[in-house]
Image (spheres, rainbow, N blue to C red):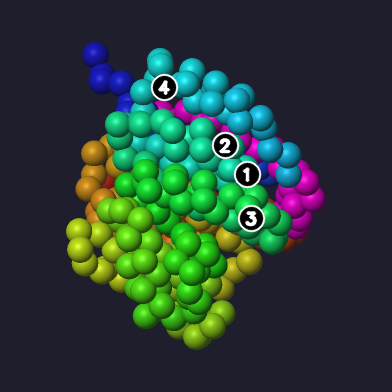
Amino acid sequence: MKPPAPIALTIAGSDPGGGAGIQADLKTFHRFGVYGTAVVTLITVQNTTRVSRVETLDAGLVAEQLDAVLEDLPPRAVKTGALGTAAIMDAIAARRFGCPLVVDPVILSTHGLALNDPAASDSLGRLVRQATLVTPNLSEAAHLAGIEVVSVQQMREAARRIADFGVPAILVKGGHLADYTGDDAIDVLWCNGRFTEFTSPRIATRHTHGTGCTYSAAITALLARGFGMEESVARARRFIEEAIRTNPGLGRGSGPLNHWAGGDDIDSDSL
């Protein structure tokens, strides 16, 4: 018999438009041959043009969802996204997953609405300390590191500071770096005591909704499949580039990516 697919778990919010949150995570898990499970933390009212409402779930209900999954469908890798409240962050940080934990410290939606309680910094810090990998964008890296982050050098410094939490790997995502410098899209990975930079031409498109969720989900899926950290990040980044380039052009605003980018063979040289 064919061995069962590895399991990955996402703990995040719901996007009814399907481009971000648990919907994007589950699509990405499936894309990489991983069985996806999901714990919902918050409900949003959004589409490609707006986010008009966010309702967080009770932390006890989130914890019950999480325990139900863990007792029967133990994952090989876990990721977190938008969590909403300090109580939810604390409930997750109290668990020991026994597998890689990828923390995507989502603070704002694509449209600028808060998806985390600004007063939850201490709880977010406790969760970050449990992480195997943290994947902040520029503003999230600035929040965690306590410095301005608008250059590659500052991305490196932010990664060093976040590493002081005891995190083995940090990926600072520079997709918006061109807004400040005009440079290409540059991501900075701190792992195994060294930096690796990933650079590519910035793709001119408004359809980038859910890029952060999808990127961290791809890394999580690859970790669940047994790839090492640096290879998982490199493969996931190539996937993201293709997913943005081949986006389906849906919606009147910032539309979703192509979550089936790259075809059927995830082990091909293109990924």
Q: Mark 3 vs mark 4: which is more N-terminal?
A: 4
The overriding secondary structure of the stretch rendered in magenta is: strand
As helix, strand or loop, the secondary structure at mark 4 comes to: helix
As helix, strand or loop, the secondary structure at mark 1 comes to: loop
Q: Do the residues labelled 2 and 4 touch (CB within 8 Å)?
A: no
- Image mark for residue 118: 3
Which residue is pictured at 44% across the width and 81% down the height? 151
Task: Give the residue pinned by disc 1.
Answer: 84
Q: How far apart are marks 2 and 3 (CA)?
A: 14 Å
Task: Assess whether residue 46 is covered by the magenta stretch.
Answer: yes
Q: Can you give x and y, in whole percent of width and height, for residue 63 in the image? A: 54, 26
As helix, strand or loop, the secondary structure at mark 2 comes to: helix
Task: Give the residue pinned by disc 2.
Answer: 88
Q: What residue type is labelled 1?
A: Gly
Q: Give the residue furthest to the bottom.
A: 181
Disc count in the image?
Answer: 4
Q: How far apart are marks 2 and 4 (CA)?
A: 16 Å
Q: Do the residues labelled 2 and 3 touch (CB within 8 Å)?
A: no
Q: What stretch is highlighted in magenta?
A: 35-53
Q: Tell me if residue 170 comes above or below residue 174 in the rendering.
A: above
Q: Mark 2 vs mark 3: which is more N-terminal?
A: 2
Which residue is pictured at 59% across the width and 37% down the height? 87
Task: State which quadrant residue 230 falls in.
Answer: bottom left
Q: Is residue 57 left or right of residue 215?
A: right
On-image quarter of the N terminus: top left
Which residue is pictured at 49% across the width and 69% down the height? 146
Q: Can you give x and y, in whole percent of width and height, for residue 34 in the image? A: 37, 33
Q: What residue type is labelled 2?
A: Ile
Q: Tell me if residue 116 comes above or below residue 66 in the rendering.
A: below
